Image: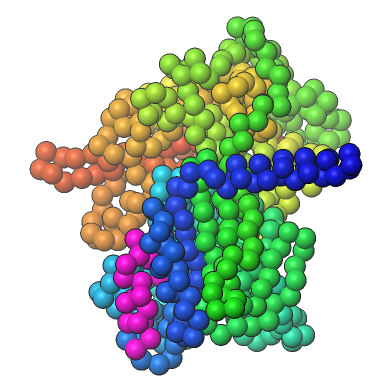
Amino acid sequence: MNYIRIKLLIAYILFFATTTVFSQQIERSIFITANTADYNDSGVLKHIISEANNQENSSVLIIGNAVSKSNLKKVIAPQLNVLNDADEVVFIPGYKEWTKGHKGVRNIEDYIQDHSNAKFFPDNAEPIKHHGLGENIELITVDSQWFLEDWDNHVYINEDSEIQNRTLFFLEFENRIKKAQGKIILVAMYHPIETNNKQGLFKNIGGFSSQNFQNKQYRTLRNRLKTIARGAENVIFISGQGKNLQYIKGSVPQINSGAAGSLEAVKNGEEGDFSLKKNGYVRLDIATDGGVTANYHAYEDGTFKEVFKTIVLKGDTNQLEPYTFKENHPNTQSASIYTKKATTKSGFYKTLWGEHYRDFYGKKVNAQVVLLDTLMGGLLPVKRGGGQQSKSLRLEDKAGRQYVMRALKKSTIKFLQANAFQETYIGDVLDGTTVDKFLADFYTTSNPYTPFVIGGLSSAVGVNHTNPVLYYIPKQKVLGSFNDDFGDELYMIEEHVGDTQIESESFGTPEDILSTADVLQEINKSGKAVVDEPSYIRARLFDMLLGDWDRHEDQWRWALYKNEDGTEYCSPIPRDRDQAFSKYDGTLISTLTRLIPVA
């Protein structure tokens, strides 16, 4: 009897927990399907619209193969008629949209947008496009077939695109993921990064077609995107290549919903996965608390039924913080970047690899202790920052001005992930290894306190600059979930070089602040040089004076000004000055820098 009571109690608790999760207020419902060129056979589109019309906020995503090789109007027009009553419809190109090359894709885009309220993303010949589906939802659409095409057959494939090659494509994808941090990120593309489709032996070892999951080019695409996504949070891939219904839990959730027409075999996956060879669709419900549930509907016995339901992402659970925070803190804290042990090297090691600024990293300094909710009137964390080495957090004050909190201790893992393991996510597997320790020591070639003197030097020569301040920031309640990676070490806090800081005098109080990509785009469109050459030359000469070699395009922002006649010009704002005054001493490094030519 007691056993039965316990089982009933457990069942009641599970029911209550599930009901609580699934009854959260829905911010948006997203209906997903693909391969709709022969949708009349299943009625999937009609059922999606009938259900979508019952939702307060809904979007319909058609993720590829909405056309066939036959007449465009004959295939697309009936679909547009069915979808006409939907709140929002987004078509995303697949394999068949490229049957007539990149010009054929543009024709499909034009037809859909001329004959309906539906959107076709990515548009304007670009392979990637971001689109907000609400305050907390970011949709990143990817034309995966653009990446897989043999560009030798399309001489002018990128003629009208800002993204001219595959390297820029990956950079843009990574940039979009970083900018959307703090939101639910949906990556919609025809080709999945994971699949349980049944494939023959030949396809499993690569095959000749770019549509095969193990094809070399396809493998490069999915591995790189997956690696970038694993470095972020709350990313979900949604695809339509598989003509079936799939959910693959994995390290990054993968949803496949391509069962609008003809079907293909699918195998069972791991525990928690779902696979079904039946016509149907997927509805994603995104709650206001950040929770995401996937509801799978299949056509059975003459009607559509829910056949699978799972929590893809858990929302805010308001659980107690796992940290015990100190109530009282000293005004200052003595701390070092590295431990004394990490910076103690033998005489032979120093001769071979150099002295660098190693002593500075192991030396304790006194820094002001601050709590973010009282600093500058109160700062709140917004999202994690990017960068290949730095561990940073974006902060925002009550007036909406944003700042960057950056750890003085650089991340070896982020550097290795970005440069050595672009197609494999390494997580923390190299922590404490020889590679990790060596790279951490190599970072000592840069002076960790250089950024704090650059501002005064910049002002003296008339170069725009940030104003970093050194603090010791303990773990604290306001950091919330960021306490996992931030706190209890030395940080610098400086203005974020963006449009929230246009009133900053050290930026020249501009009209706006632009990225390098924005400036280049304006130059390409207008054909005019909008950069103020004297200020740029001055900034570059200053780089040489400082020995600051790390000046790639993301290390610059541009202050936009207007002349009295209405014309515009941009003045540079250099940022991330942590490589100034670098010190490459030591016999081996000196030899290597002479043997290896500098581009």
91 in relation to 580, above or below: below
- Residue at 60% x, 42% y: name it: 20
- Residue at 60% x, 22% y: name it: 477
Q: Position of residue 524 (x, y in %)?
A: 30, 61
- Residue at 44% x, 52% y: name it: 28
> Which residues lie in the magenta part?
74-96
Q: Nearer the viewer, residue 372 or 346?
A: 372
Quadrant (top left, top right, bottom left, bottom right) of the C terminus: bottom right
Farthest-out residue, left: 565
Q: Position of residue 419 (x, y in %)?
A: 65, 53
Asked whether the viewer can see residue 271, the reply is: yes
Please give left or right for residue 263 compared with residue 501 in the image: right
Q: Nearer the viewer, residue 326 or 491?
A: 326
Farthest-out residue, bottom: 70
Is residue 372 magenta-colored? no
Asked whether the viewer can see residue 146, the reply is: no
Quadrant (top left, top right, bottom left, bottom right) of the N terminus: top right
Please give left or right for residue 277 compared with residue 350 in the image: left
Is residue 94 magenta-colored? yes
Give the color scheme: rainbow, by chain, secondary structure or one colour: rainbow
- Residue at 47% x, 23% y: name it: 379
Please give left or right for residue 534 compared with residue 65 in the image: left
Q: Nearer the viewer, residue 355 or 30?
A: 30
